[in-house]
Image (spheres, rainbow, N blue to C red):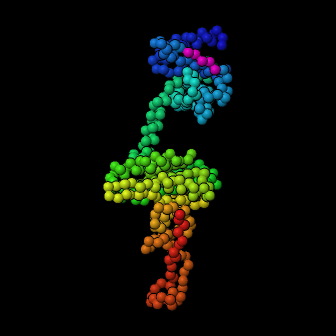
Amino acid sequence: MSNEQLSVLEKKIERYGTILETTGDIIFDYHIDEDRMLFDEARLEKGRYVHYTLAVDRYTEALHLGNLVHPDDIEETIRLINGLTVQAIVIRVTRPDETDGRYHWTLVRAATVQNSEGRVTETVGIMRDIDDQKRREDRLVEESRCDQLTGLYDQKWTRIKIGEALEANNEMDKGILMLIDIDGFRAVNENLGHIFGDAVLVETAEKLTAHAAPGDVIGRIGGDEFLVYSPGVAENQIAGRVARIRRIFDHTFEGKSQAYRISCSLGVAACPKDGTTFETLFHCADQALSMAKMEGRDRWCRYDEKMSGMSYLNGHATNIDTAVFQKSGILQKTGYSSTFSKSWPILRILPPPCF
């Protein structure tokens, strides 16, 4: 840096010194033609402010090679310092006085300087650390999406998050949606008390979270109903994944006069075989869960296309067969009056695909 440049910088430091000392901001001065960035910061050390200046040559290259700015924010930063975008952005940057490499959310305000020909040659501005504020706001947003009791996503945000995960999938990406209902929870809630019941739900949510695989989305969508989407689970891995989930729900609680056991019924739908959207997969998982309940609970069912149009009569899962019998054949076997319809659907008992 030349003596002339140092002299200019010293004048700027003197001019903005008070601002730096009272706000904790960092002032920057970017010279576009030279691709040089100058930073100035005042730090409180031993009861007095000390000014630090950092000069970075070939700044654009440094952005791409180093960790000065979060990779996702580099292009926007380059546009800002070259006067090509709005004059205020929020980005993630590392601080020169820290060595841990942690990114801080930072508000950057900038203004351009033109030469006598009207060409932008310089960008000056301030950088204000808003990391604490941004993280508080993010926490509040996240809390607003969560079930107040368990801290899991609520029904609305469970659907949104799973939908986003599915949209991000490639066409052949695998995954499973598990719809879970706690068996025996009502008896626990009514006989051991609602506070105890709430504690059971909280502990269950904590265990689901602790056993979650990377990318899992977990939500509480009803009183004792949970929904889990697990990406990357192949067909031959479903049974093992489900077994681990079911163990979380298997507990016995001792009451004054008797013990109360909880378990879970679970319906599974697989992506992409059973569908690729939240609505389709949820519908399939819901039918599989209904089958598990009707077959005695405390078990899981894998969705099968034969469950489409499922109906439940006399405690058994049945399906309306598409076969149609002519009036004559039915009437000969049943003796029904000829006033009945000429087409008769029959109910066919399905073997339960439950485990």
Horizontal side, residue 141 vs residue 28: left or right: left
Tell me residue 206's x, y (percent).
46, 46
Residue at 43% from the left image edge and 45% from the top image edge: 151
Horizontal side, residue 152 vs residue 238: left or right: left
Res 330 seen here: yes
Q: Is residue 349 above or below residue 58?
A: below
Q: Quadrant of residue 61?
A: top right
Residue at 48% from the left image edge and 64% from the top image edge: 292
Is 43 covered by the magenta stretch?
no
Horizontal side, residue 159 vs residue 7: left or right: left
Query: Toward the viewer: 121 or 125?
Result: 125
Res 124 seen here: no
Residue at 49% from the left image edge and 73% from the top image edge: 318
Horizontal side, residue 58 vs residue 330: left or right: right
Q: How many numbered dots are placed on residues in this image?
A: 0
Q: Is residue 42 above or below residue 318?
A: above
Tell me residue 9's x, y (percent).
58, 13
Tell me residue 144's x, y (percent).
42, 43
Q: Main secondary structure of the magenta part?
A: strand
Q: Is residue 126 above or below residue 274?
A: above
Q: Which region shows up in magenta?
A: 52-56
Query: Toward the viewer: 67 or 312?
Result: 312
Tell me residue 231's x, y (percent).
58, 51
For the N terminus, which image quadrant?
top right
Q: Is residue 149 above or below residue 27?
A: below
Residue at 60% from the left image edge and 60% from the top image edge: 273
